[in-house]
Amino acid sequence: MTDQGFHFAQPLWFLGLLAVVPVAIWLLRSAARAARGPVHRYADPHLLPHLTGTRDLRTSERWGRFLRWSLLWALLMTAMAGPRWDFTDVRLFHPGNNLLVLLDISRSMLAEDVSPSRLGRARQELQDLIVKDRQVRLGLIVFASVPHVLSPITEDIGSLLNALPALSADLASPSLQGSSLTRALARAETLLAGLPEESARAILLISDGDLDEPGLEDQVARLAARGIRLHTLGVGTPEGASVPAPQGGTLIDPADPSRRPVRSVLNEPLLERLAEAGGGLYRRADYRDSDTDSVLAAAAVSRLPPEAGDARTRIWNERYWLPLLLLAGLLLMQFRDMSGGRTRRGVGARTGEGARP
């Protein structure tokens, strides 16, 4: 259904028009100061241009420029306010595919064997996953020793994108070391249990595989038997890197008599075994899109068609580009006039025809 209703999406931007008032006051005061300047003691006003090589703008010229730039500023504020009309009512669809991401934020994810770090690369992969997703509802759990639910299964990708900059190892207590995937999987199972069994329910583990817990494969196999598949995305390199310490420097292994730095490597064999036990796939994270494409394709295997809900949303036809086009045209005319004036003054200087006030 379509209807018309002109309004502005962000009308508070019009408060920016108040900036015109102090600019006008400044022009008045600066013009008054210029008229009382000490240079006026040495010559009559009509002789000052010959003395200084410049001339003061006439009142009409000064305020003409002010009005032109005020118009440009008003057009910019209008564009920022977001004029729009003509909306379309769209019924929301709830896809039958659900993917819950488990993101490892333990200290080993701060290793820098990949750029900018393992956790930084994981955030990039998660952002690609969110942006490219069109068929899967997503959720996010971060975990180290304790899991934290940042977002349940949702269609609101905006909230997920807003949460990405806050994903850091600081979310985990520095006094607790290691990663507890067992607890994270149990928390994920609780969140996915309320979804229809006919829908596709999957978990994506993003980790370096630095996990030392018994019974992980059996736990993953039990989830697979309940219809919850596990995919894994490995972050890091087999060569590994040292792990940064909370207080700076590198983490030292207290059990090592020589006190060598802790070195973490990508445990691909474990991640591959977990994916195999969970009926999913394993990919190593890189800058290409094939890893996220593979995960999304594997998660979108629901036997349920997209379900139309009762909720509806309005999709507005934004018209902010109309004042922007007018603003660009006026700016081009302004710069053309300025460049033309400079050219004429240059020709006059070369021919000895100086401009008179």
Image (cartoon, rainbow, N blue to C red):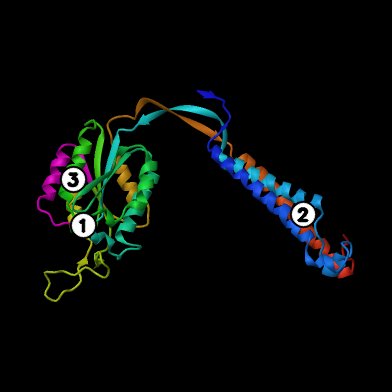
Q: Closer to the N terminus: mark 3 or mark 1?
A: 3
Q: Is residue 28 left or right of residue 320?
A: right
Q: Closer to the N terminus: mark 1 or mark 2?
A: 1
The residue located at (19%, 59%) in the rendering is 175
Q: Closer to the N terminus: mark 2 or mark 3?
A: 3
The answer to whether residue 213 is magenta is yes
| CA distance for labels 3 and 1 | 14 Å
Pointer 1 local density, CA inside 10 Å: few below 14, some 14–19, many at least 20 = many
**Residue at the spot of label 1:** 209
The residue range painted magenta reads 209-230
**Residue at the spot of label 3:** 185
- In this view, the residue in front, 123 or 354, is 354
Please indicate, yes or no, whether residue 290 appears anywhere in the rendered image.
no
- Element under label 3? helix
| CA distance for labels 1 and 2 | 65 Å
The answer to whether residue 324 is magenta is no
**Residue at the spot of label 2:** 337
At label 3, the amino acid type is Leu
The residue located at (15%, 48%) in the rendering is 182
